[in-house]
Image (tube, rainbow, N blue to C red):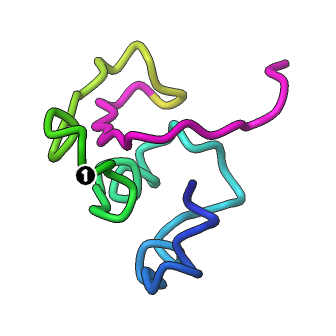
């Protein structure tokens, strides 16, 4: 959902994303760890601030991967 941020007045998040590398690299952890209230459903109180840090074995460059979730799903296409 990073590509939506430029239309949600979140240009700083959009500009922080390095689109030339995959999402799961340490260079993009700032973006993965950012939560946006606009993507949290008002009736889903459990989602607000929900964060999880995946261990280094889950990332492409062996660093921890913090992730903040939203209430809404996205589609990245098919996985290779």
Q: Which of these two is toward me, 23 or 63? A: 23
Q: Quadrant of the C terminus?
A: top right
Query: Is 79 inside the magenta-drawn segment?
Result: yes
Give how far across and how far down residue 64 sits, in percent. 29, 30
Q: Which of these two is toward me, 22 or 4? A: 4
Q: How many marks?
A: 1
Q: Which of these two is toward me, 65 or 45? A: 45
Q: Which residues are magenta?
A: 62-80
Who's the residue at 64% across and 65% down the image?
Answer: 3
Who's the residue at 67% across and 60% down the image?
Answer: 19
Choose top left, top right, bottom left or bottom right for residue 26: top left
- Is 63 located above or below residue 74 in the figure? above
- Is 32 located above or below residue 76 in the figure? below
Choose top left, top right, bottom left or bottom right for residue 27: bottom left
Residue 15 is left or right of residue 26, and the answer is right
Label 1: element kind: loop
Give how far across and how far down residue 54 sits, in percent. 30, 22
Query: Is 66 inside the magenta-drawn segment?
Result: yes
Which secondary structure dominates the residues rendered in magenta? loop
What residue did someone put label 1 on? 42
Most extreme residue toward the top, as rendered? Answer: 57
Q: Quadrant of the N terminus?
A: bottom right
Residue 7 is left or right of residue 68, and the answer is right
Who's the residue at 46% across and 25% down the image?
Answer: 59
Most extreme residue toward the front, as rendered? Answer: 43
- Is 48 located above or below residue 18 in the figure? above
Other-residue count near label 1 (Cα within 10 Å), few / some / many at <14 / 14–19 / ≥20: few
């Amino acid at each position: 959902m990073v590509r939506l941020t430029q239309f949600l007045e979140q240009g700083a998040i959009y500009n922080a994303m390095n689109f030339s590398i995959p999402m799961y690299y340490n260079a993009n952890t700032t973006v993965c760890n950012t939560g946006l209230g606009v993507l949290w459903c008002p009736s889903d109180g459990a989602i607000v601030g929900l964060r999880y840090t995946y261990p280094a074995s889950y990332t492409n460059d062996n660093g921890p991967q913090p992730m903040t979730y939203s209430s809404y799903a996205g589609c990245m296409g098919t996985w290779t």
